[in-house]
Amino acid sequence: MRRGVLLLCLLLPVTVIYAQKITVTGNWSVPNFNSQKPVEAGSDYVSSFVESASNQTLLNVNGTGGVLGLLLTGFNIQVRQTVTGPALPPGLILRARRTGEGLGYLIGLVPLPNILGYYTNYGVPKNEYLTLTSANQNFFGFFATASLSLGSVNDIPIQYRLEGLSVLLPVNTYSITVTYTVSP
Amino acid sequence: MKFLIQVIIGMIAWNGVRAQTTGTATVGFTLPLVGIIDLESPSSKNISLVFSNPAEAGNAVALPATNSFLWLNLTSAVAASQTRRITAQVSGSIPAGISINLLVTGPSGSGGGGSARGTPVSAITLNSSAQTVINNIGGAYTGNGVNNGFQLNYSATLQNYSQLRSGSGTFTVVYTLTDN
């Protein structure tokens, strides 16, 4: 009986800890290219890139993460792009960066119950752009120094940058789905 | 043994809820059509073609030298299968007895798009109808200013001596970028 209770105590958190959830809000519909379009005959685009608002997309991550026996636990966010409709012409690339830390908490459970906060020095540093590809890439993570962690980090701001604008590119309507994946 | 089975069941439950979760955002944009042309010159965009009196009675009127001061710059963005052309036509009246000819050469200078900058056609005699002078323009830009793009070479010839009158005439050559 005592062994059964002990086992239950061990298994309950284990069952819960890998329930991550990510909520993504905020699409980016580039309104026009009035600030980038050529204004002088003979010239290309005035600017070869356009940026979204610094918080165009907000990520909310909650749940728990970690692996028993490790001292560094948390969430890892990966990102990839899927082009729907016409293929992107060569030279036209979409980049994304995290412009802030978000708000929230991460609680380390083991070895001792404690609140350590979190840090994000994993993956691409804040304010540095990552060029998106069709393959998942490590974007960033939230970590606590514990074996198990749980918590919630909300309103992580993401900014996009579309690069390679030129009149040489075919006029068309393009759509890109950016997929964020959270894992422990 | 029973304890071991419980551990195994627990581990299965653990793996069962380990699935990653995802969320998506959409980025959408439309690259716009662009079509801009202008003329560039080291000085004025108005040119003069002046016939000279012969120095000797019985000789023909001397023709003006070809004027190549003007350059046509263009920027064009089109859909993948679309092309454009540039036409030239006269607005106003060319003095009687005179032909004004236009030869477009190039493109040259800086710019991008290679052959999509367009191809000049053969020399034309200008009149009030729109005639193609550059064709097969795609997504391209010629570079800005003189020595970039297409050079416009104007010349004048005498078409009918009997219609020649002294004086001067002024007319405008209109260039238009249009879709094919």
Image: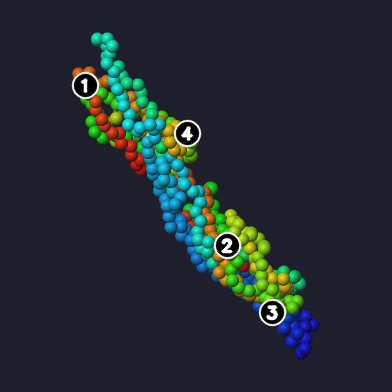
- The residue that label 1 is drawn on is B166
**Is residue A44 among the parts visible in the rendering?**
yes
The x, y position of residue B9, in whole percent, is 71, 79
Is residue B157 toward the left or the right of residue B112 in the image? left
Name the residue: 69% across, 71% down: A144
Cα distance in 3D space between marks 1 and 2: 74 Å
Name the residue: 34% across, 27% down: B154
Q: Which mark is residue B117?
A: none
- The residue that label 2 is drawn on is A99
Q: Mark 3 or mark 1, which is nearer to you? A: 1
Q: Are marks 4 and 1 on the same chain?
A: yes
Q: Secondary structure at mark 1?
A: loop
Cα distance in 3D space between marks 3 and 1: 104 Å
Pick whichever, A16 or B5, lies toward us.
A16
Picture quadrant of residue A21: bottom right
The x, y position of residue B122, in whole percent, is 37, 28
